[in-house]
Image (tube, rainbow, N blue to C red):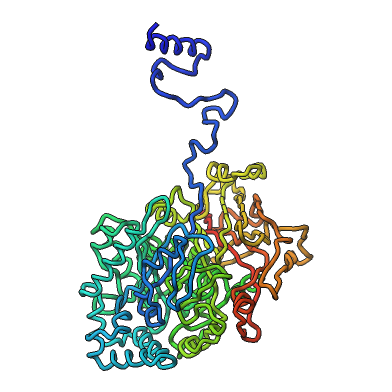
Amino acid sequence: MNKGMWNLLQTILVCSLMPGLVQASDIGSPQPEVIEGLYPGKAYSPYAQRSFPSRVYWGDTHLHTGLSLDAGLFGNTTGHETAYRFARGEEVTSSTGLPAKLGRPLDWLVITDHSDMMGFATDLQRGAPNVLAHTKGREWYDGFQKGGQAAAAAAFDLISNFTQGTVPKQFVEDYSPGSAVYTQVWDAITETADRFNEPGRFTALIGFEWTSIPKGNNLHRNVVLRDGGERARQVTPMTTQPPLGSTDPLVLYQWLEDYETKTGGQAFALAHNGNLSNGWMFPIDKTYAGGRVNAKYVQLRAKWEPLYEVTQIKGDGEAHPTLSPDDEFADYETWDKANLDISVLKEPEMLNGEYAREALKRGLALEKKLGTNPYKFAMVGATDSHTSLSTAEEENFFGKSTSVEPSATRVRHPFVQSVLGAWEGDQLAASGYQGVWAAENTRRAIFDAMERKETYATTGPRMMVRFFGGWDFTDDDLRSRAPAFRGYEKGVPMGGDLTMAPGGKPPTFMVYALRDPVGANLDRLQVIKGWMDSRGDLHEKVYDVAWSDDRKPGADGKLPPVGNTVDLEAANWTNTIGAAELAKVWTDPDFDPDESAFYYVRVLEIPTPRWLLYDKVRLGAELPEGAQLVHQERAYTSPIWYTP
């Protein structure tokens, strides 16, 4: 019997013994085996036919190199290659000559150098002829050559001129899009990103920071491109200095529209943390640029700004104790500064337009009024480091700028005192990182995950967090080591929407958190809810939904503190309290199907040392009286919204 006849006989025999398993048309085409009674109609392997994102990828959407005007003025002499090598896990040398390496590599990075006057700081430091030919340029150059207080004064004067729009016209023209210097710098940025982008291993997303800072009000946005250098080089970044630039976000939205139309690519913007915006980051009535918060504004902002930077080096922007007096964890890395205009004092009424939770509530009101929620954003953690080093690890923190890279005296560095005034070094936060749930580590997948808002922020730890909303989750859905299967099957993930409560039933939420493998145990899971009632009043409430150890809420409903194992002499802690993982299916007990609402999760770790304690123990640093040495790091998921 030849081989062909033998194969045919085998097929006939199988078909006669197992009817319905193989059809005549299947001969010659391998088919997945289906075992009756076990996952009927599905593959045995639960991973074989999975289409949802199964891995979280860690990165930073806000990092500066020496090409940024301020970073270069602060002494950063390193560039994009150093930043990418460091993020990939390689050892590099910082601008102050220190060896530096991440404890664990990042998966992706967006370098966001300031788009205004890119390349000027480099030319100023080396004394380029066009810089020295101008009186002001010579003055700044001489100050930097003297060093110390003179250099700090020169940097402060230059930055003040930039924020007030009084930089000499010659320099604006020499370092604006279209100039030879600017084109050369942008080409180098995009080419380096392409060179370090390795799909599946490390993603280098191209971006820049649009540095809108009228009169010292920080209204910055980071622009992120989905595309490679071929498309990115068809444009030049949006700037703020006239005549080519603008500080109005509506003009930035037009730039984004033009980019997509011209290149066929995709882009979005994310707002810089708003705690230095003097109340203007989340307007409710009028914008700083003199416009109105109208239908056009809310539609464009909702379209182009899907993300918000909720935590970074210059403080945490989730909540403020004045705005959320009943939230015992609202006062975390709080900065109440008025940014660079020292003539402006921070007033309490400014806070409403600066913090994420209040913005989410304002978004509900604007949606009711104008039909679109402009503040329907995902939560992002980033560093905003100006050292080229994306460090958010407390024990490995290289500071905001080169002036506060590790040293025994960095907390009281003259630059921090003279340039930043009351912004003393001990108030810097070693924060943060962004976790993205994506199908793969590529530009396309990372960008798309951020745009659909399936992403979350942490203050540095890499805890794994899942958050789903739906109508039918039960405790049985958590009886698995892979709750995401039920999460996607029965609901929507973080960043999603729930509508039309069936029969008026309350929504159920499934949340799961696993501690950072090399980090601290977890204290608790909290659901933060915001809603608008029938009168248009806005409310919020914090619910403790899962916690570690054998604690019980007190008569006031508050959960007792988890405890504290921090060893102040050794800058260490022990995981003898807390839990490695926490999970809960929670139903909103106060749900009203007629009220719009949002829900997000805050995950709290047990207390751990802050970077200042590591400086004290390892470097012998003398710390200011009252300096905070211990804190509770955290994660913030993107919200899930309910709309009647």
From this view, report whether residue 399 is shown above or below residue 514.
Answer: below
Locate residue 155: give its quadrant: bottom left
* Quarter that holds the N terminus: top left
Q: Is residue 313 visible?
A: yes
Q: Name the residue rendered at 34%, 84% in the picture.
A: 162
Q: Name the residue rendered at 50%, 76% in the picture.
A: 399
Count of numbered circles in the view: 0
Q: Residue 81 at what x, y percent from top left?
A: 37, 66
Q: Is residue 534 visible?
A: no
Q: Name the residue rendered at 32%, 58% in the picture.
A: 194
Locate residue 389: give its quadrant: bottom left
Q: Is 257 on the left-hand or right-hand side of 325? A: left
Q: Is 590 on the left-hand or right-hand side of 448? A: right
Q: Residue 292 at what x, y percent from top left?
A: 38, 73
From this view, report whether residue 262 is shown above or below residue 170.
Answer: above
Q: Is 467 on the left-hand or right-hand side of 5? A: right
Locate residue 208: give its quadrant: bottom left
Q: Residue 210 at what x, y percent from top left?
A: 35, 72
Q: Residue 140 at what x, y percent from top left?
A: 33, 90
